[in-house]
C-alpha cells in the first residue's frame, strides 16, 4: 500500500477522455434519472442513440424487478410476505446469492437485510431527523443475512420481520447488465455512469484507456481527488459525502453500521474499488467503507483475482492506494 497526499489542484473532469485532432465519430450522450440517481450513457464509436434508449429501458426493467420501494418487485414481494416463500426471477436469486457471499466475506459489515433500519433514516428530504433509539434497537433485531433462505427460485425470510434492501449491490448488478446489452449491440467504446458506479466499454476514441476521475469528498462539483485509467473496467465509489445531513456539527450519512444501526464511523470519507464487474465493486466499496482501512485492505487482499485496484480516503482526504 502507498500513501499519497490528496491533490490540491481543481481538475475539471469527473469522467473525461482526451481527444486528439483527428476527426472521429461524434459522441452520443443521454442522461435520465434512474435508480434514484442521474444516469448518463455516452457512446464514442458512432453507435446508434437507440442503444442508449434500450439500455435505459433495461435499467428500468431491473429497477422494477428489485427495488425495495416498489411493492410489485421481487424484493417488495419478499418483504411483504412476512416469512412466506416467494417465487422470484433468476436475476433476483443471483443478486441475493452474491449479497450473501459478500456478507460472509465481510463478516456481516455488508448485510442486504439492513432494510428494517435503513428505512428509518431519511437522507433525501432534508428533514435532518435522527430515528428514535428504541426504534433502531428493535429494527436491528431483524438484521441478519442468515435469515435469507433460498430454495431454487423460492425465497423465504426465516424472520417474518426481516426485510431486504438491495441498495448496496443492485446498482452494480444492473450496470453490468447494461454493459452486456450495449456490447451485444456492437458498442465498442462507451461510458456508463450510474452515480457512483462507472463502467467503461473498450478504449476512448484515441485508442487509450479512459481516464476516470474520483470526486473529492465534500469538495466542489467536479473537483477531482485522483484518477484512474480504465479499459473495460468498473469503478465504484462509496462514501459519507454522497447522501448525508449535518446536525449539531455531526455528519449523518447513508452507509449504516449493521451492528449499531447508526452511520458507520470508520475513519474514512470514501472508498473506490476497481473490478471487472460492477456488482463486485458495489458490494466491496460498501463493505470496505464499513470495515475501515485496515480490515478493508485485508478483505481486498483475499480477492486479488477480483479487485484490480482500490483507494481508501481518510477524513483528511489523504488516500491509501491498494494494488
Image: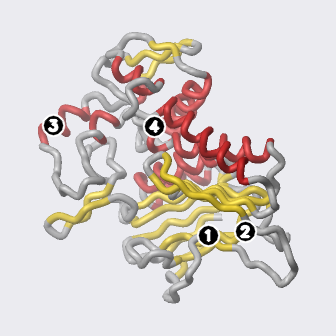
Q: Say which element carries label 3.
A: helix
* Crowd around label 1: few <14 · some 14–19 · many ≥20 (10 Å): some
Q: In the image, which is nearer the foreground, mark 3 or mark 2?
A: 2
Residue 297 in view here: no
Residue 15, disc: 1
Q: Earlier in the sequence, mark 1 or mark 4?
A: 1
Q: Which residue is disc 2 drawn over?
A: 210
User: Residue 152: percent from the left, percent from the top?
Assistant: 58, 13
Which quarter shows the C terminus? bottom right
Mark linked to residue 166: 4
Mark 2 vs mark 4, CA separation in Å: 29 Å
Q: SS at mark 2?
A: strand
Q: Is residue 86 above or below residue 73?
A: above
Q: CA distance from mark 3 to mark 4?
A: 21 Å
Nearer-the-camera pick, 241 or 321: 241
Badge 2 vs badge 1, beta-carbon distance below 8 Å = yes
- Frontmost residue, 31 versus 130: 31
Disc number placed over residue 135 in the picture, else none? 3
Amino acid at each position: 500500500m502507498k500513501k499519497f497526499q490528496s491533490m490540491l489542484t481543481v481538475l475539471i473532469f469527473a469522467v473525461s477522455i482526451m481527444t486528439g485532432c483527428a476527426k472521429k465519430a461524434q459522441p452520443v450522450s443521454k442522461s435520465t434519472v434512474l435508480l434514484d440517481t442521474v444516469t448518463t450513457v455516452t457512446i464514442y464509436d458512432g453507435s446508434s442513440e437507440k442503444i442508449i434508449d434500450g439500455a435505459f429501458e433495461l435499467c428500468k426493467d431491473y429497477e422494477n424487478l428489485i427495488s425495495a420501494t416498489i411493492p410489485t418487485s421481487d424484493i417488495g414481494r419478499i418483504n411483504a410476505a412476512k416469512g412466506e416463500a416467494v417465487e422470484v426471477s433468476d436475476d433476483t436469486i443471483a443478486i441475493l446469492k452474491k449479497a450473501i457471499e459478500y456478507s460472509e466475506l465481510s463478516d456481516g459489515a455488508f448485510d442486504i437485510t439492513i432494510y428494517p433500519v435503513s428505512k428509518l433514516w431519511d437522507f433525501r428530504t432534508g428533514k435532518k431527523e435522527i430515528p428514535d433509539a428504541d426504534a433502531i434497537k428493535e429494527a436491528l433485531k431483524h438484521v441478519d443475512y442468515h435469515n435469507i433462505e433460498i430454495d431454487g427460485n423460492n425465497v423465504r425470510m426465516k424472520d417474518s420481520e426481516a426485510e431486504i434492501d438491495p441498495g448496496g449491490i443492485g446498482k452494480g448488478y444492473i450496470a453490468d447488465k447494461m454493459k452486456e446489452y450495449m456490447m451485444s449491440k456492437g458498442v465498442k467504446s462507451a461510458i456508463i455512469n450510474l452515480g457512483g458506479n462507472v463502467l467503461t466499454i473498450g478504449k476512448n476514441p484515441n485508442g487509450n484507456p479512459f481516464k476516470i476521475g474520483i470526486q473529492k469528498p465534500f469538495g466542489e462539483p467536479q473537483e477531482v481527488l485522483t484518477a484512474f485509467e480504465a479499459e473495460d473496467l468498473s469503478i465504484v465509489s462509496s462514501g459519507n459525502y454522497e447522501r448525508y445531513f449535518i446536525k449539531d456539527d455531526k455528519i449523518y450519512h447513508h452507509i449504516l453500521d449493521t451492528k449499531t444501526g447508526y452511520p458507520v464511523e470508520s475513519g474514512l470519507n470514501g472508498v473506490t474499488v476497481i473490478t471487472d464487474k460492477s456488482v463486485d465493486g458495489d458490494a466491496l466499496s460498501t463493505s470496505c467503507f464499513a470495515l475501515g482501512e485496515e480490515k478493508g485492505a485485508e478483505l481486498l487482499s483475499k480477492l486479488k483475482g477480483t479487485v484490480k485496484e482500490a483507494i481508501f480516503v481518510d477524513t483528511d482526504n489523504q488516500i491509501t492506494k491498494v494494488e
